[in-house]
Amino acid sequence: MSYEGKANIPAQKKGKAVTTGAVGAEAGDRPPRTQYGALCWRRRRGGSEIEVLLVSSRETGRWIIPKGWPIKGLGPSETARQEAYEEAGVNGKVSDACAGIYSYTKLLGPQRSNGVPCVVAVYPIRVSKLLDDFPEREERRRRWFSPKKAAQKVDEPELRALLREFPEVLGKKGEKSGGPKKAS
């Protein structure tokens, strides 16, 4: 599910996301909320193979990409870059072009029984450096995977597809600005 350009990215409007598709019936009738995620990537040393960085979630320890709620004063790609820094210690060049979207239900509350449907717009970040000192270093693990292996590690089907297809998208669109080029 790749989207070209910002026109198709879910937009924030009075705290609620405006989207064109449905998100998980298990979340009930709640409107979907928008988050921004970072697909952090690098080329393996001396090679042309791509690796992507996953982080563990704080609650369950499952593998995810860095993501979070919109940050006041920052655009979508800048929010993704900030989340990548906070959750994984990533420094790098972010693409302004959304690489795709995926949906999931965020479980909140003491028993994690309150489901909030979320749509995540994903922005590629070409990693130039991983910092040892970052805000959530005590709460998360981080690990590099091939896109294929990363796709096997995540739970969300749409994110799996995005990870599997990323090397091809990157090859077709180029690497300028950290990832796929904007649509003309």
Image (spheres, rainbow, N blue to C red):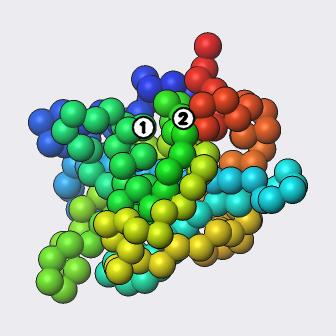
Q: Amino acid at mark 1?
A: Ser
Q: Position of residue 109 (x, y in %)?
A: 15, 77
Residue at the limit of the structure toward the top, as seen here? 184
**Residue visible at 69% across and 48% down in the picture:** 166
Which sits earlier in the primary sequence, circle 2 or circle 1? 1
Horizontally, residue 49 falls left or right of residue 135, namely: right
What is the quadrant of residue 121 in the picture?
Answer: top left
**Residue visible at 32% across and 55% down in the picture:** 68
- Asked whether residue 176 appears in the rendered view, the answer is yes
The residue identified by callout 2 is 95
What is the quadrant of residue 146 in the picture?
Answer: bottom right
For residue 77, the mark is 1
- Position of the C terminus, as image quadrant, is top right
Location of residue 106 with respect to 15 vertically, above or below: below
- Position of the N terminus, as image quadrant, is top right
Q: How many other residues sit within 10 Å of disc 1, few (<14), some (14-19) or many (≥20)?
A: many
Q: Amino acid at mark 2?
A: Ser
Q: Position of residue 13 (x, y in %)?
A: 18, 33
**Residue visible at 78% across and 44% down in the picture:** 168
For residue 154, the mark is none
Horizontally, residue 179 falls left or right of residue 59, namely: right
Q: How many marks?
A: 2
Q: Position of residue 91 (x, y in %)?
A: 50, 51
- Asked whether residue 99 appears in the rendered view, the answer is no
In front here: 90 or 80?
A: 90
Q: How many other residues sit within 10 Å of disc 2, few (<14), some (14-19) or many (≥20)?
A: many
